[in-house]
Amino acid sequence: MLAVIDYGAGNLRSVLHALKHLRADNLRLAQHGSQLAGASKIILPGVGAFGASMEQMRRRDLVAPLLDALAAGVPYLGICVGMQMLFDVGEEMGEHQGLGLIPGRVLRFPQFPDRKVPHMGWNQLNFKGRSALFRGLDQGSRVYFVHSYYCAPQDAGATIAAVDYGLEFAAAVQCGSIYGVQFHPEKSQVNGLRILKNFLRIEPLGDGETVRRAQAE
């Protein structure tokens, strides 16, 4: 069963439309933690502020069941804020605690003399090594972004794709079977559909050791 988390602010319509196009079956909207039971894959689309999103996750009792599922090796894809929440702390409108699965912080873009914030539009991915999430995509593939904050992992090895927008930042991260993308695959046309299709084919880890190591660092 594929669970798509609905905490009241996610970009659900576009994501569900893309998954329907890919003929993803046995799909469940999870609005409460109990609805994550039995999930074989989890997608968390995110739209909104980091702190408010985490608060909604807590109010709906989604945090502990999500962490339990990821510790068991269930593949996860976080989109935009769904990626940001993987980190320790987000600095949007004050400091807010994230899920703490990937050490690092979520920071606001500085003021650029020649670029606007938010970072909005198409940009090219610079792949860092190989990942199953990007199978079939060429270096420099373009995807669609809308964000004012970016993720800064402590360990550069967590970054599987980067983008240059006045500075180089993590466009995608991976920790075992946990994936996060700052861009919106559901708005990235053919490349985005390829990424979602690749995620649907990823198998569970089974032992969750990577997750436990990340939490202990």
Image (cartoon, rainbow, N blue to C red):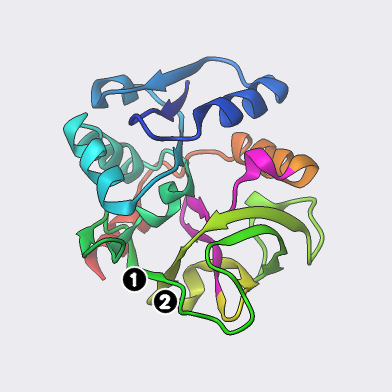
Q: Nearer the viewer, residue 138 or 184?
A: 184
Which residue is the extreme one toward the top? 26
Residue identifier under label 2:
155
Residue 132 in view: no
- Any mark on residue 104, and which? 1
Residue 17 part of the magenta segment: no
Q: Residues within 10 Å of mark 1 (few under 14, many from 20)?
A: some
Which residue is the extreme one toward the bottom? 113
Picture residue at 44% right of the left edge, 42% below the top: 46
The magenta segment is 169-188
- Any mark on residue 206, and which? none
Which percent across, then down, holds residue 199? 60, 40
Report which quarter residue 74 is drawn in: top left
Circles 2 and 1: CB distance less than 8 Å? yes
**In the image, 205: left or right of 69?**
right
Where does the C terminus fall, quadrant-wise?
Answer: bottom left
The type of residue carrying mark 1 is Gly
